[in-house]
Image: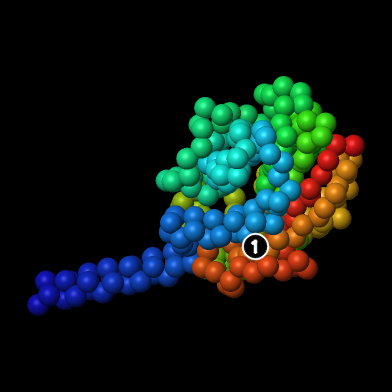
Amino acid sequence: MKIRESVVNNSYFCTMKKFLLKLYYYPLLSPEQTNAHQKRARDCEWEAIEPYIKQGTFLDVGCGAGYSMFKAQRIGCEVYGIDPDPQGHGVGRRKSEYTVPVENIAQGFSEQLPYENNQFNTVYSSHVLEHVTNMQQSLLEIKRVCKADGIIIIGVPTATMAWINWITQLVFTTHQKIVNTLFSPFINTGKTFWWEIFVPRSHSYPNKKTVIADICNYSTKKWKTHIEKEFEIQTIIKPCIYPYPEYRQLFKIQKNKRFSSSVFFVCIQK
């Protein structure tokens, strides 16, 4: 009788454990789902900026797994890319079907591009400036390697994206953060603050601390002020609004010029 009760209790415990773990991880998507959602967002942005790309040599600063290089290659460009961690992020980072010349991908940083002066017809940088250590140095390097009659296309996140990030994490990760905070003495040695449950880290972390900094700094006006120090801005594009790809989708991606998750500046040399 005691053995039977023990088996029943163990079965109940295992069932509850599985249920709680499923609930804990429910908001997170599989790598394949995340990749598909990110691809849709990048495709929407690319569709908006593709008409401005100049034929010839194309450099992607912050190329990740090379998806934008793949897209530029398809329209006839000779493509190059640089990233601190090639293949480490972006569409296709886990298993890529998008073939690009890997010998043209360099490991390095935007503050010190390993290219000649006036080398590229188009210099493209998407969702990079918010992560760099020195923004103005990065812009100066982009300026240096772009031809005098070349095109510079710079994409950055908006405050809208920061709000989506905050709301998404409140909805989907609050329960995880509560559990992690309660049990933090047992699972890590770092100090966890209760306010971090409700105020997530900055998308630009560690350069910025919280999402509040993103909301304040990711305005189109502020990005424009930085960029026009080095370039003449010809066009400002707000392609679409999209949910965070890593979590279950709160809404469908849609073109919305007023509330866009990203903003792109199409520039020429001054």
* Percent x, y of residue 71: 58, 46
**Nearer-the-camera pick, 3 or 117:** 117
Q: Determine whether, in the image, residue 94 is placed left or right of residue 218.
A: left
Residue of label 1:
165
The crowding category of the residue bearing disc 1, from other C-alpha atoms within 10 Å (few below 14, some 14 to 19, many at least 20), is some
* Percent x, y of residue 214: 74, 55
Q: Please say whether residue 18 is visible from this viewpoint.
A: yes
Give the colouring mode of the picture.
Answer: rainbow
**Disc 1 residue type?**
Asn
Q: Quadrant of residue 32?
A: bottom left
Give the residue at x 19% y 75%. 8
* Percent x, y of residue 47: 65, 56
Give the residue at x 72% y 22%. 116
Quarter of the figure that contains the N terminus: bottom left
Vertical order, 236 against 269 (above or below): below
Give the residue at x 28% y 72%. 15
Quarter of the figure that contains the C terminus: top right
**Nearer-the-camera pick, 78 or 36:** 78
Q: Quadrant of residue 77?
A: top right
Q: Determine whether, in the image, residue 81 is placed left or right of residue 211.
A: left
Vertical order, 157 against 120 (above or below): below
* Percent x, y of residue 7: 16, 71
Q: Secondary structure at mark 1?
A: helix
Q: Determine whether, in the image, residue 172 is placed left or right of residue 220.
A: left
Give the residue at x 74% y 45%. 153
Q: Please say whether residue 197 is visible from this viewpoint.
A: no
Q: Determine whether, in the image, residue 10 is placed left or right of residue 223.
A: left
